[in-house]
Image (cartoon, rainbow, N blue to C red):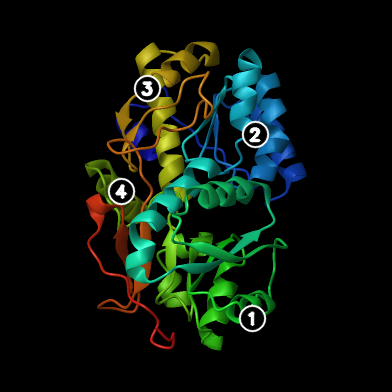
Amino acid sequence: MATQLNNDGGLLGVDVEVVVKDTELSPDTARQAYRELILQDEVDATFGVFSSESHLAIIDDIAQQQTVHVAGGTGTTQLNQLVRDDYESYKYWFRNLQNGDIQGMNQGLFAQEQFDDIGWSDIALLVEDIEGYKSYASGFRANLPDSVTIQVDENFAAGTEDYRPLFRRAENNDVDAVWIYASVTGATAVNQWSRSQADFELGGVLVAASNPNFYRNVDGAQYTVTAIVGGTPAYRPTEMTTAFIEAYQAEFDKLPPDYTGYTTYDAVLAWVTAVQEVGTTDADTVVPALENVSYTGTMGTVEYYPRDHKWAHDVKYGEGLVVPPVVQWQAGDGPDGKQALLWPESVDTDAYQAPPWVSR
């Protein structure tokens, strides 16, 4: 984005500089990094942050510093509540990713439309014990069709390396599928599932599965269903999606590495669009423009829920706006496999493939 802006004369006639800090998935590190960006680097706006814990750690700093922050990750709805309850303090915060409630609902709609055809009626729900996944799981439970029964519903510790006891409990309860929410060690879960040839299928939200190299790097990638929480090279709902992917490849000689590349690109684009509209980076002037922004991004048409909505300042969800897809990794023509698009219906181009070792 910065390269593109600077090639076109900068933002408001000034070259854009990008300053990067690593939160290391640590709330304390995130807080220190945020304060350095604001107080030392004197940035005009901030973007990103992956985990809900880190985001909650900096939200009061965002309010105190009165600087726009547009998130490209994190699922907790506590942030929306802060905007609703104390707008003047927290109005500077926006999120360019569907929150956990919306993501869970989105996956529940997938279940309503496809679980029966796939053959899933009894499932295990395994949820990593991190803040962001709490609302994912509750939204998913609330939107499951009556034809689906959760036979096992368990939380597991963040950073779990041995999923085999969880998988054995699922198999002992004769489930058709495990729907799992796993972040950092999701690839480990996939490998252990496939190597054990457990008699159930695997889906859910696996952060690692959004990486284009997932199929090449993870033995059990094939037959894994994953709900994408942002973007993916296989899902190109707008011309901007293709333009972004091609520009990223031209600059870095690879595909965007995971979903946050798309969400954060759109987050920066939202702020840039608002700044160009009002002709200043002043946060109090930019916020109303952001609240009314509407533009075509990599994920679809980007607009934000109003300040009094239960999902205040989140990107709007729905047909004609942004609908995250559900994909399945399948064998392709080359070593990288392919992300087969299963859902929504508007992009449903591939049929689900069951693992050959699962009895039906």
Say which label, 2 or 3, has the lower sequence index.
Answer: 2
**Residue 316 in view:** yes
The residue where tag 2 is placed is 78
Task: Name the quadrant of the N terminus.
Answer: top left
Q: CA distance from mark 3 to mark 1?
A: 49 Å
Q: CA distance from mark 2 to mark 3?
A: 23 Å
The residue where tag 4 is placed is 247
> Residue 154: x and y, percent?
67, 63
- Tell me if 275 is positioned left or right of 45 in this view: left
Say which label, 4 or 1, has the lower sequence index.
Answer: 1
**Badge 3 amino acid:** Val
- The 10 Å Cα crowd at callout 2, few under 14, some 14 to 19, many 20 or more, is some
**Badge 1 amino acid:** Arg
What residue sits 70% from the left and 20% below the top?
Answer: 64
Name, please, the residue furthest toward the right: 28
Q: CA distance from mark 4 to mark 1?
A: 45 Å
Residue 168, which numbered label?
A: 1
Instruction: Report the mark closest to the observer, 2 or 1.
Output: 1
- Tell me if 103 is positioned left or right of 172 in this view: left
The residue where tag 3 is placed is 293
Task: Name the quadrant of the C terminus.
Answer: bottom left
CB contact under 8 Å: marks 2 and 1 = no
Say which label, 4 or 3, has the lower sequence index.
Answer: 4
**Badge 2 amino acid:** Gln
Q: Nearer the viewer, residue 65 or 205?
A: 205
- The 10 Å Cα crowd at callout 4, few under 14, some 14 to 19, many 20 or more, is some
CB contact under 8 Å: marks 2 and 3 = no
Say which label, 4 or 2, has the lower sequence index.
Answer: 2
Say which label, 2 or 1, has the lower sequence index.
Answer: 2
Q: Nearer the viewer, residue 93 or 255?
A: 93
Instruction: Report the mark closest to the observer, 4 or 1.
Output: 1
Which type of secondary structure does the marked residue at label 1 adopt? helix
